[in-house]
Amino acid sequence: MPGRGSSQEPFQVVRERLRGTGTDLTCFYVTPGANFYVFSYEKGGVRRHTFIDTGDSRYREQIFSILEENDISPASIERIIITHRHPDHCGLADLLAGESGAKILVHPNFRGFIEGGIREEERRWLGELNPSRLKEHDIEYLADKGEARSISGVDFPGLGQPLEVGEGCRLEVFACPERKQTHSPDQIIVLYSAEDSRPTDSFLFSGDLWLMQGPLFGWDMRSVSRHLRYGRDLMANLMPGRSMPPRDPREQDAEAKEALKRGFVLTRVKPGHGQEFLGSRILPRSLLADRDLLVELAYSMDASKSILKQRDVAPRVAALREQAYTSFTGELLLWGELGYSPDEISGLLARIYKEQSGGGRLVEQDRQERRERLEETLARLKDDEAMSDELRQLAQSTLSNLKAIS
């Protein structure tokens, strides 16, 4: 399990030695604000660091202090990978690169951000950040290497060559598929893997593409100004001749997000906001909320749930639920084949259950329904005489564990 480091508001710091390696990963979870992550490893007899995002310049003094507290010297940074252009993610890139001479790695579309190709509405959100200053550093616009990673049928273009972060450890950088409704035109995701590892030894750094909760702003004086700017921009878009921007975050990069949800057996997701969560295709394939069922039946996700009770639809719903059960039991068998013990599998299911909670108005009810589906599925498996005694016992012990989770 990850080891915990210091806690200095608004930061929670978690450090862990990556399994089977000499590399450490330090995670800086920031609320309100954006997370950033640091790999630390030996290279040429020197302790070096690779950053994924840099944090918000609003917290510059605290960040430099907390880096020192966690034995991360800014002067020893080898590279900085920026997931996208928003100031809470890249705000300290200029200062950190200035301290270290680190190479800054970005999506090719990041060039327009640095060279002034941004809209006035976006410029107002930058605050004191001056993107053009990044031109003074060693910045690399990662080229499409012509190879894509297919994730659940969606191609994520590969950018640059794999990066070493310690012996046997590597990072692969992928561009997000371009889409008109997007969070940012220069998003990347970063996949960490190590030799001889299991799925849960891998990490996906998803930036703001895949989150369990959206960006959070507090109500201190610095954050109030952001709320006011946001309200002003919304009002401006209500003026004659201008249209209201899309408010539903589910529509942004929908294809890419759905691919990530369905594309991983098990992987630990390190998001741009909020705590780490476990990404598993068992959720979209086997634990279907009512809204998931509507989408599977080719209805809008916002269609009335009463449709699912209609006489002509009920058989199709039953077939989907049966398919979900078959998929669920198949995944548990696969986890066993991948080397996870029954106790570990039970723990993974309990973690998935625990993480399906909270969120905004659009998702909280869906998550509660997925919790209910997991309980129902385990209850069925426990009594399913067609299944092995081991699977039935696993279901029973997991149900007992779920009772202790609020």
Image: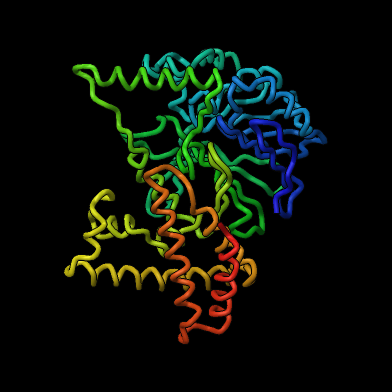
Q: Residue furthest right?
A: 45
Residue 52, can we see it?
Answer: no
- The residue positioned 79% from the left and 32% from the top of the image is 71
Taking 130 as reference, is 362 above or below it?
below
Question: Horizontal and vertical percent for residue 284?
Answer: 41, 58
Q: Nearer the viewer, residue 392 or 221?
A: 221
Taking 219 as reference, is 319 above or below it?
below
Taking 83 as reference, is 376 above or below it?
below
- The residue positioned 42% from the left and 18% from the top of the image is 228
- The residue positioned 63% from the left and 45% from the top of the image is 170
- Image color mode: rainbow
> Which quadrant holds the C terminus?
bottom right
Residue 327, can we see it?
Answer: yes
- The residue positioned 60% from the left and 20% from the top of the image is 57
Question: Horizontal and vertical percent for residue 23?
Answer: 73, 44
Whether residue 98 sits left or right of residue 320 in the image: it is: right
Corner quadrant of residue 1: bottom right
Question: Horizontal and vertical percent for residue 179?
Answer: 33, 36
Corner quadrant of residue 66: top right
Q: Nearer the viewer, residue 299 or 359?
A: 359
Corner quadrant of residue 343: bottom right
Q: How many numbered marks, from 0 up?
A: 0
Whether residue 364 sits left or right of residue 47 in the image: it is: left
Question: Horizontal and vertical percent for residue 389?
Answer: 56, 84
Q: Residue furthest bottom?
A: 385
Taking 189 as reference, is 354 above or below it?
below
Q: Nearer the viewer, residue 24 or 70?
A: 70
